[in-house]
């Protein structure tokens, strides 16, 4: 009770934390409802397709997402940093130029990603899905890349503008449409193409809807002619490109190592193992969903604290959001440990072997969930290459060990390696961030007049 009383007192008196939670709440309410819909749709899809078919769907969807991420420049982070700074200093031309450049860059990368996907689809169908006839399905799902042509840029604008409510509505509509179509496919005994079409439609709604919201927010902030601003107001090209390139490289490394487990498992093992992993990660999503909105809503606040060089405020933000994320993650992990097999039975008895890899995945994903702010902190401090280097070296070690161990020992070892990657890399990033904060704080104190 004392702990709960202390938490309530902090929340009641901390206006900034209230703002973060309020903005997170818009996304959280959408995500919680979306999570329920996602669980329902994954259960129906798994029961309809079986373990192997569920694994093939996961392989197709993750393949397109991975290619898109490889060529993405994480424009939302670039927009939050440079558009946010320009807005804070009332430099409207610079703000417009940043968003315009980010949008055009993202469109170019989307077209390139889709063309490469078309070229690689036959190879992916044969080597990853173990079925050359799925080539057309790889290409069909790849069209979501084109539908998300300025998604990240729009998300960055929404974050800076603190307009999360509309984005939450779009997220919910997307989840509802996808779940409805999969439910229909299950009860009408359809198959893999219909399930894939449901995912595609949801992604189209999410991508295009978010772009419309971002455009509307730009019109409100800078007027309807903002997109005609020339690029002369941009920050130095070397600085802008360096930030975009470093975040792209970092994102690519993180995605190749962390977010595309389905592809690595498909390469080393079988679609059945992919099905187990996909199910395990879908259930672990129950732990991650409530925390995910904090990533979007705390990054601008962390960035603002760094801009103001208010290190006390920065520490307070990090400490209190960690307390929230740690409490939720710990309680959820205990729940999954006790009732994980019960959840798996909803998918079917054939999915019960996913319990052990689920618990192994949970160790690393839970650790990263608690310290979710690790990378945004270094980005705000102007150190985008640090998480890249740490993730790169840890990722090389993880992948190297996977080539040696996973074909011999199977899915559980892959799950263990992913968790080890999270624990080691996140710990190193957090330590580096705190070291930089202490250094800057000491420099500020030395510059203060006696």
Image: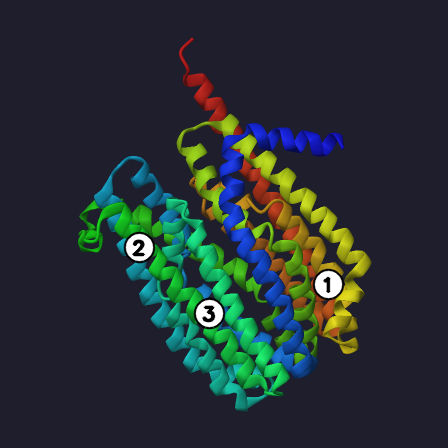
Foreground pick, 45 / 284 = 45
Residue under pointer 1:
358
Q: Earlier in the sequence, mark 3 or mark 2?
A: 3
Q: CA distance from mark 2 to mark 1?
A: 41 Å
Q: Is residue 277 visible?
A: yes
Foreground pick, 205 / 265 = 205
Q: Earlier in the sequence, mark 2 or mark 1?
A: 2
**Residue at 37% of width from left, 53% of height from top?**
244
Residue under pointer 3:
203
Residue 81 placement (x, y as % from top left): 38, 44
Foreground pick, 93 / 70 = 93
Is the residue 173 above or below the residue 88 in the image? below
Kindly report which numbered mark, 3 or 2, lies closer to the viewer in this rendering.
2
Is the residue 186 above or below the residue 171 in the image? below
**Residue at 66% of width from left, 55% of height from top?**
287
Q: CA distance from mark 1 to mark 3?
A: 26 Å
Q: CA distance from mark 3 to mark 2?
A: 20 Å
* Farthest residue, direction top: 450
Give the SS element for disc 3. helix
Is the residue 42 above or below the residue 127 in the image? above
Q: Any mark on residue 216, and which?
A: 2
């Amino acid at each position: 009770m004392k702990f709960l009383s202390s938490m309530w007192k902090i929340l009641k008196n901390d206006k900034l934390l209230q703002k973060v939670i309020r903005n997170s709440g818009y996304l959280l309410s959408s995500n919680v409802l979306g999570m329920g819909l996602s669980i329902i749709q994954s259960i129906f899809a798994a029961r309809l397709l079986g373990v192997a078919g569920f694994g093939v769907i996961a392989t197709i969807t993750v393949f397109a997402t991975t290619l898109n991420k490889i060529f993405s420049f994480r424009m939302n982070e670039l927009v939050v940093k440079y558009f946010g700074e320009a807005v804070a200093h009332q430099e409207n031309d610079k703000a417009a130029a940043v968003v315009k450049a980010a949008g055009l860059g993202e469109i170019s990368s989307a077209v390139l990603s889709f063309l490469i996907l078309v070229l690689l689809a036959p190879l992916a169908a044969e080597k990853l899905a173990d079925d050359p006839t799925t080539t057309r399905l790889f290409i069909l799902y790849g069209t979501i890349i084109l539908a998300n042509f300025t998604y990240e840029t729009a998300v960055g604008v929404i974050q800076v503008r603190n307009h999360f409510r509309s984005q939450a509505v779009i997220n919910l509509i997307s989840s509802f449409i996808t779940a409805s179509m999969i439910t229909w496919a299950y009860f009408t005994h359809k198959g893999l193409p219909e399930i894939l079409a449901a995912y595609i439609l949801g992604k189209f709604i999410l991508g295009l809807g978010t772009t419309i919201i971002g455009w509307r927010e730009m019109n409100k902030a800078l007027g309807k002619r903002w997109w005609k601003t020339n690029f002369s107001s941009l920050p130095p090209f070397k600085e802008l490109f360096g930030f975009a390139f470093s975040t792209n490289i970092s994102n690519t490394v993180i995605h190749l190592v962390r977010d595309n487990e389905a592809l690595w498992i498909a390469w080393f093992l079988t679609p059945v193992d992919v099905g187990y992993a996909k199910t395990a990660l879908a259930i672990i999503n129950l732990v991650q969903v409530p925390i995910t909105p904090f990533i979007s809503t705390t990054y601008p606040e962390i960035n603002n604290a760094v801009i103001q060089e208010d290190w006390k405020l920065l520490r307070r933000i990090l400490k209190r959001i960690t307390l929230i994320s740690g409490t939720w993650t710990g309680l959820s992990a205990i729940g999954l440990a006790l009732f994980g097999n019960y959840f798996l039975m909803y998918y079917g008895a054939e999915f019960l072997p996913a319990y052990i890899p689920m618990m192994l995945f949970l160790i690393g994903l839970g650790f990263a969930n608690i310290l979710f702010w690790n990378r945004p902190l270094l980005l705000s401090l102007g150190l985008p290459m640090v998480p890249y280097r740490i993730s790169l070296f840890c990722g090389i070690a993880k992948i190297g060990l996977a080539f040696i161990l996973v074909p011999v020992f199977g899915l559980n070892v892959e799950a263990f390696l992913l968790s080890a990657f999270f624990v080691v890399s996140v710990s190193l990033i957090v330590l580096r961030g705190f070291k930089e904060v202490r250094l800057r704080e000491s420099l500020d104190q030395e510059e203060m007049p006696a």
